[in-house]
């Protein structure tokens, strides 16, 4: 009888552990749609000044817009960022990925 209660206790602990790991992994998935943001650096990368436009549905659309704006400002650098959000601890935007090819 002692043995049965120990086995039930161990199974219960492992079940709770498995459920917790599943819920943590599930919460890490990104439910947000793929949105791109354009960053056009009018005074160069190191100035910290840029023009940002959000909500492009694809990298290609963001790239075309960024190239057009870059040309308007004499071919300044640009980047497109995926799922960008403002990070108050760093006082700037953080993106999952940044591309500029």
Image (cartoon, rainbow, N blue to C red):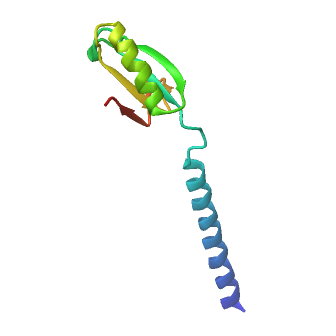
User: How many badges with numbers are in the image?
Assistant: 0
Q: Residue 80, percent across and down?
A: 41, 27
The answer, for residue 90, to whether it is visible in the render is no
Residue at the location (64% across, 71% down)?
Answer: 15
84 on left or right of 1:
left
4 on left or right of 35:
right
User: Is 61 situated above or below 72?
Assistant: below
33 on left or right of 39:
right
User: Is 90 situated above or below 49?
Assistant: below
Q: Name the residue nearer the viewer: 28 or 31.
A: 31
Report the residue that reaches farthest toward the bottom: 1
Residue at the location (36% across, 10% down)?
Answer: 49
The answer to which quarter of the image holds residue 98 is top left
The answer, for residue 31, to whether it is visible in the render is yes
Q: Name the residue nearer the viewer: 26 or 67.
A: 67
Q: Residue 39, percent across and down?
A: 40, 20
The answer to which quarter of the image holds residue 64 is top left
Residue at the location (30% across, 18% down)?
Answer: 77
The answer to which quarter of the image holds residue 14 is bottom right
Q: Residue 25, percent across and down?
A: 56, 55
Which quarter of the image is occupied by the C terminus? top left
Q: Name the residue nearer the viewer: 73 or 88.
A: 73
Q: Residue 45, percent across and down?
A: 28, 17
Which quarter of the image is occupied by the N terminus? bottom right
């Amino acid at each position: 009888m002692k043995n049965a209660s120990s086995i039930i206790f161990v199974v219960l602990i492992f079940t709770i552990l498995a459920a917790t790991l599943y819920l943590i992994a599930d919460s890490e998935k990104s439910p947000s749609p793929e949105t791109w943001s354009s960053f056009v650096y009018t005074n160069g990368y190191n100035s910290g000044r840029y023009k940002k436009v959000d909500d492009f549905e694809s990298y290609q659309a963001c790239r075309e817009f960024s190239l057009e704006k870059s040309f308007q400002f004499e071919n300044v650098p640009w980047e497109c960022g995926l799922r960008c959000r403002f990070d108050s601890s760093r006082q700037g935007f953080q993106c999952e990925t940044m591309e500029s090819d």
